[in-house]
Amino acid sequence: MFGRTFSLLWALLASAALPALAAEPGLQVTFTSQGQSDTRVDRLLALYVPAQQCPTPFLAAGPFTAKWEGNIESPVRGTFNFSVETNGKFKLTLNGKVLLTDTEAKTAELNQGANTLTAELTSAAQGDTFIRLNWSSKNFPLEPVPPMVFSHATNPGLEKAQAQRFGRLLFAQYNCAACHADATKIPRTGGLPELNPGAPLLADLGKKYRPEFLAEWIDNPAAIRPHTLMPKLFSGPDAAQKAADLAAMLTQGATPAQGTKDLSQAAAGGALFANLGCIACHETPDATTRDRIPLAHIQDKYHGQVEPLMAYLQNPAATYAQTRMPNFRLSETEARQLAHYLLARGRMVKRTALVGDATRGATLLATSGCLNCHAGMPPTTQPPLSKILQNPARGCLAEEPAARGTAPDFHFAAAQRQALLSFLATDLNSLQQDTPAEFAERQIQNLQCTACHARDGKISRWAQLDNECKKLRDAVPAKEHQEGDPVPDAPIPALTWQGEKLKTAWMTSFIAGEVAYKPRTWLIGRMPGFAHATAANLASGLAHQHGFSTVEPAEPEPNLEKAKIGETLVGNDGGFNCIACHGLGDRPPTAVFEAPAINFVQTIERVRKGYFQRWVLAPVRIDPETKMPKYADPEGVTAITDQLEGKGPDQFEAIREYLRTIK
Ligand code: HEC
Ligand code: HEC
Ligand code: HEC
Ligand code: HEC
Ligand code: HEC
């Protein structure tokens, strides 16, 4: 299968086994606006830049040019037809020859392996600018050139631009501005969305957490969670005592009695931990490795108490709006089982704790900078931004602990420190603006979407943990499988084409956890919910990455004549029998055992029109593993010749018109 070849090639390119190629995925793209340039890597040769919006956060809004450079890695030698959809001025050069200068399709021979590509775009004279590069061949119909075939070689200019981008994100996420403020350079609202990240509310901690644990956390957060955003604020011989004082203050008035764990529920919780995908982001609580986010300390942190842990699992954002832990809409039973699993398998630390003094703790809380992050209090004693820009490699960014002085320790790796220095050397104007396309890319990484989703030919982390999952599932007695019971190991949709597939409004609600129904009822796993504002910006950004507007053009009322034909075509009497697998409203699929599929009533509000056509014409081009049959040959002709002259695209259009009429 073609898709498999791509994935294989992709795996080879991505593996360190072939350093000679030194090729990275995606294309390098250089934007120029008002005499300034900026470079980044894009997954696709596609863009959507709304009028009045900057093409990248490092450039001013207004007319711009874009230049893509890199390779198309072709799995075979062959002939391909290229075409472009754009409202700008475009030129495509392949293997040194100019191929496209307008929207007319042209044929090109590609060599097996790398083919050099350069493309240039001048933004549209007015309004939004968009571009999408497509191809087709005798083996497959027109489609966007997929991200899996693009590669580029890295170079110092690109590396510098990437470091600045990374540093810009770190500056926001680690809340540098909480202590090093500057009202003119750092916007409180608008601008880079990750600015002002906040921190958990420090209220009622005594009801939930064990003071000894909190002292250990405050003394050195990174020792408990390697990728924490909270710095170590105290150094020197009295650091542990200060932490104990703060813990005493924060838990004053209540300390939890040790809870009781119910071992009989732990195994069911363990199975959920595997089946819901917790395992894709987290180590199991009995693990000693810390590659994924550790949970071994949970028993200790919660002092073995079930109720507060359940409350957290059911609403992780309750005391921390910007948490990266998503909301799984867990039922009471699920939350209880998961809580018992985490409490039963984790460690409880026996320590000789320092005795904390709550009064000293209260003073420390007000003077140590805790509240700059935790309560948004303006900084008082820390140097302002202008000051740290003069000495950027010191204090919080010092390489040696001795040179850090009284500054917090963020536990930065060398690459993070370098990135922050790179960013601080810019004019910082990029904090004032952002683009959804770059936001989406950053957040897919930050929120670990690829823990559960395959993307651009790379399998998900979850899919690499089959052995660990199996152990957890096998610990509960097997139930006999009933027809219609959800299963743990059915495929999860890849993220690769979602920007082209889903309507932005629906995708926003879905990522935000606001869609009441579950499209794939046959999965035990479910898509967890993330904050609404993040979801909206992410969904818009994915559309833009694929060259689409966030709004689909309005459609006229359904064509009832076509819809009538469509109704016949979905059925098994003179049609394709789509309803064998697809339910139609409250009519269940007629042959569920074939391959479960999404109910057709959801399709119209979910799926964009163009993608509907592309999917039904050649499903394996999008998902090489799909069980959905292909109904049209490469010319688009189907086996049903007595309707609409056997023309696949017209027939599928009729089906879509029919689906638009059903409720
Ligand atoms: C909790 C408050 C806090 C936060 C958050 C914070 N800093 Fe600092 N920073 C300090 C303090 C305190 C100092 C030391 C001031 C001194 O030694 O007088 C400092 C010093 C510095 C210095 C050295 C300035 C000099 O003149 O020597 C730099 C550079 C710096 N910080 C960068 C950063 C960056 C970048 C971030 C975000 C990753 C950050 N800081 C986050 C409190 C903070
Ligand atoms: C630079 C910002 C920043 C500063 C300064 C900071 N924190 Fe935090 N803190 C965080 C973030 C962010 C979290 C959430 C954990 C994470 O993201 O890793 C957190 C988590 C915590 C938690 C755990 C809360 C929970 O419900 O799990 C406690 C307790 C805490 N901080 C106390 C303190 C204290 C006390 C200080 C001052 C000594 C302090 N923090 C300083 C950012 C900060
Ligand atoms: C997409 C990644 C992701 C998934 C999936 C996920 N988590 Fe988390 N979880 C996080 C992150 C990140 C944190 C760190 C807290 C933060 O950023 O606020 C966290 C925090 C937690 C904590 C609190 C840790 C502490 O130190 O207090 C618990 C408990 C937890 N997760 C349990 C679960 C369970 C149970 C599931 C499955 C139902 C799950 N998580 C699924 C990302 C994830
Ligand atoms: C814990 C695993 C998990 C994580 C983490 C996760 N997803 Fe999902 N996602 C799923 C599952 C399972 C589905 C299928 C749900 C269904 O159809 O019932 C899904 C479905 C989707 C869909 C709908 C696709 C379609 O064709 O219907 C989109 C879009 C999506 N996820 C985006 C994201 C984004 C963006 C992130 C990161 C912010 C993310 N997901 C993180 C598990 C996850
Ligand atoms: C053998 C079973 C089967 C048959 C028959 C079938 N499909 Fe599918 N269809 C699937 C599967 C499997 C998926 C992908 C489900 C997923 O994304 O997890 C799918 C997905 C779709 C989607 C995307 C839906 C969405 O909301 O994501 C559309 C549209 C679609 N099919 C249309 C059709 C049409 C039109 C026909 C008949 C011409 C048809 N299908 C026949 C199995 C089938």
Image (cartoon, rainbow, N blue to C red):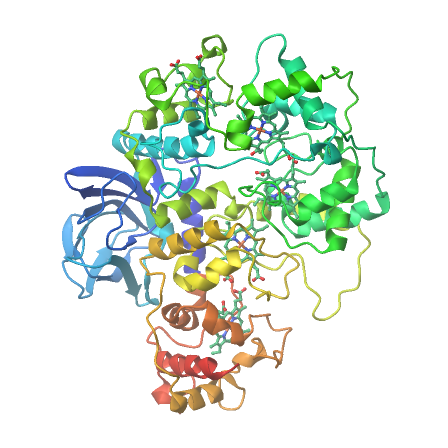
* 363 shown above or below 47: above
Q: Residue at x 47, y 54 (%)?
A: 495
| For residue 60, side relative to residue 414 (left or right) | left
The image quadrant where one finds the N terminus is bottom left
Taking the image in four quarters, ligand 1 sits in the one at: top left
| For residue 631, side relative to residue 636 (left or right) | right
In terms of depth relative to the viewer, which is nearer, 570 or 315? 315
Quadrant in the rendering for residue 397: top left
Q: Residue at x 35, y 77 (%)?
A: 555
Residue 606 rendering spot, x and y as whole percentages: 47, 68
- Residue 469 visible in the picture: no
Residue 32 rendering spot, x and y as whole percentages: 19, 42
In terms of depth relative to the viewer, which is nearer, 71 or 600? 600
- Residue 160 visible in the picture: yes
Residue 186 rendering spot, x and y as whole percentages: 36, 33
Number of numbered markers: 0
